[in-house]
Amino acid sequence: MSRKSQLTPYDFSHQDSLADPQVSCDGRYITYLKKSRGESSIIVVQLSNGMSKAVYRAPVKFAHPFGGGVSQLASDGETLYFVTASGGIAKMATASGKIDMLYEGPGVSQISLSEGGSRIAAVIFGDRVAVFDLFGKSGPFVVSEYPRELRSFEGTPTVSDFMHERPDFIFDVTMSEHGDWVAWHEWALPHMPWQRSQIALVELDGSGSATNSISVCAGGDFFVSQPRFSPLGKRLGFLAETPEYLRLWTGDLASWKAELVVDESFEHGSAPWGNGNRTYAFSRDGTRLYHTRNEGGHGRLVETSLDGTGSVDVGKAHHFGLSASKNLLVALRSGARTPNVVVSYDLLTSERREVERAYSNSFYNAVTVEPLLGKASYSKSLHRYVKPEFLEELAAVEPMEVPYRLFKPEQATPVGTLVTFHGGPTDQATVTFSPRNVAFLQAGFQVLTFDYRGSTGWGRSFRSALDGGFGVAEIVDLLSVLADLIDQGLAEPTSLLVNGGSSGGYSALRSLCLTTGLFCGAIAEYPLIDLAESAVGTHRFESRYFDHLLGPLPSEIQLYKHRSVSPQDLEDVPILLMHGDSDNVVDHRQVVRFVEEAERLGRSIEFTLFAGEGHGFSSPDVIEKEYHYYQRFLGKIAERIVSQSS
């Protein structure tokens, strides 16, 4: 690695974020959201004028780069409708940037526009759908309060149970071309959406109110997501996890029959942690679908014909926020060597064109490597490092194969191995661009990511295998992966660090509680510590998550206590811990108490509590400090490893 490729903490913290790309039906305009130095803007690209860009500062609610749904481009590209930061709805003229408020709010989180531009459907307060007449003739009408009847598409699995009454949560509202149909994704506690959810569908009359009861057309007692109407409004697309993998289906609204788009052992989406995921898009004539394929954590963009003639590859890497015109497909692209970038694909020539990069050119010259892929068989060879009081508990965990990815520096021998537990835990260590991986590689460490049981991307059975075992089973999987690497000579047991954020931070710290002499340090950000306190004090979305990960409270309170991170059990190795004092997912006070007790016991913890930060840091100044602390901490660990080996 050359010196000129080294990035500073300032470089890592002062990069842009791009999200929610859209293309107009006629292919003349592309829009997307941009966040730079904490300020949100709407970018309008006029393709008919040599890719000219206009940047409009706007009070837009910003979306996660891999999410969306907060902006909708009119079919002619001349108006963009968006959700405001205060939860209202506004429209902006793409030629001038002039903004008009349509609804002051509050409560709107996601919108969908009829192609004629006469109606908008919106998710409001997270649990209801309202329809707005943009010509002001009627409404708004809340259309999600009506009784539900089970009317599953023919061809989908038989449903034994479904949610009859209004839901606790709604995601991903979608409106048909003429504004006469609305569909959405809904579910109720105690379930998470990837356990049991359903697609609700309602027909509207001329005024915008519902004409009859709401039809549950897919799901009920299995996982569905991402409803979306075809451009002509004749079909409804959706993802369904049946019988094993989350794959793309379409339902014909005339015949009420649904078909699996492509029968393959790959998933076409992931667990919905927020609104607006778009991992597929219909072609403008409704005869083809452009969709992502998760190939063991790697991404691929595919075009599939609905007449059964097959699929063709469009591009490699992960793609998010798919949007199609007649001749153009736009998306946000991300891969191991591909910093996030908005791209367009010419659907006639398959030519890919960069629209805008989120990261500066220095990132394209930094350490970006493709991972070595592997699958580790179950192994007990590292159980010799497990503390005696936990051996029986770990031995009772069912053996499983565990997929992993090892990112090795190309031109240097790594000083050690930094293992990352992904968050969730219902998520996956996908091969998307990771600034943290770059920082860890620059510090001289190889980076190991792995999909412990409970991860998405490998089917229902693998994802549900963590149920009841959280805090132990993922540690067993980690030990199997590390044993595989050590057996191959790719890692040393004296130079291993664990790392993670949120649930991943918890699992990293649990690794230090269950073992001794194996790890030489850990990094944990906004980790869970007290599981019972986390379960009862977290935000509403995850309020019953632990019912499945551990069991219901109060009956399983002893298990919650046993699986919490105990300062007494914590291995005395250097730990870097960071948290925000405005975190509504994991209350920072449990972390502060943990640190105080651990320090009283003589544990080595570098702890920083950031003012005003939540569950994930957002301020550029705070992120700069975060990466500075990484650099300083890993530098100390590297020096210690080198000195001990010499």
Image: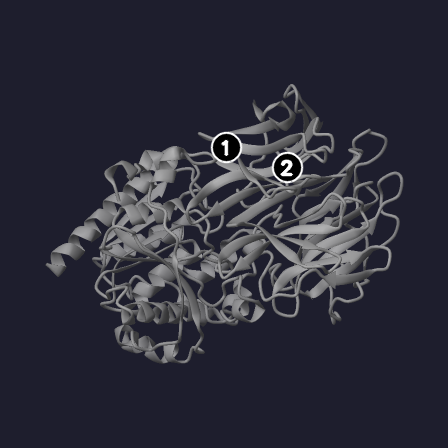
Does 509 appear above or below 476?
A: above
Q: CA distance from mark 1 to mark 2?
A: 16 Å
Residue 631 image offset from top left, x and y in percent: 26, 44
The residue lying at 59 percent from left, 66 percent from top is 265
The residue lying at 28 percent from left, 74 percent from top is 387
Tell me the quarter of the picture where residue 529 sits. bottom left
Q: What secondary structure is marked by label 2?
A: strand
Packing grade of label 1 (10 A; few <14, some 14-19, many >=20) is: some
The residue lying at 62 percent from left, 32 percent from top is 30
Q: How many marks?
A: 2
Does 307 appear above or below 282?
A: below
Does 161 appear above or below 91?
A: below
Residue toward you, 19 or 611? 19
Q: Tell me if 526 is positioned left or right of 46 in this view.
A: left
Q: Tell me if 240 is positioned left or right of 286 in this view.
A: left
Residue 76 image offset from top left, x and y in percent: 73, 30
Q: Is residue 631 visible?
A: yes
Q: Amino acid at mark 2?
A: Gln
What mark, if any, has residue 35 been given in the picture? 1
User: What residue does disc 2 label?
Assistant: 22
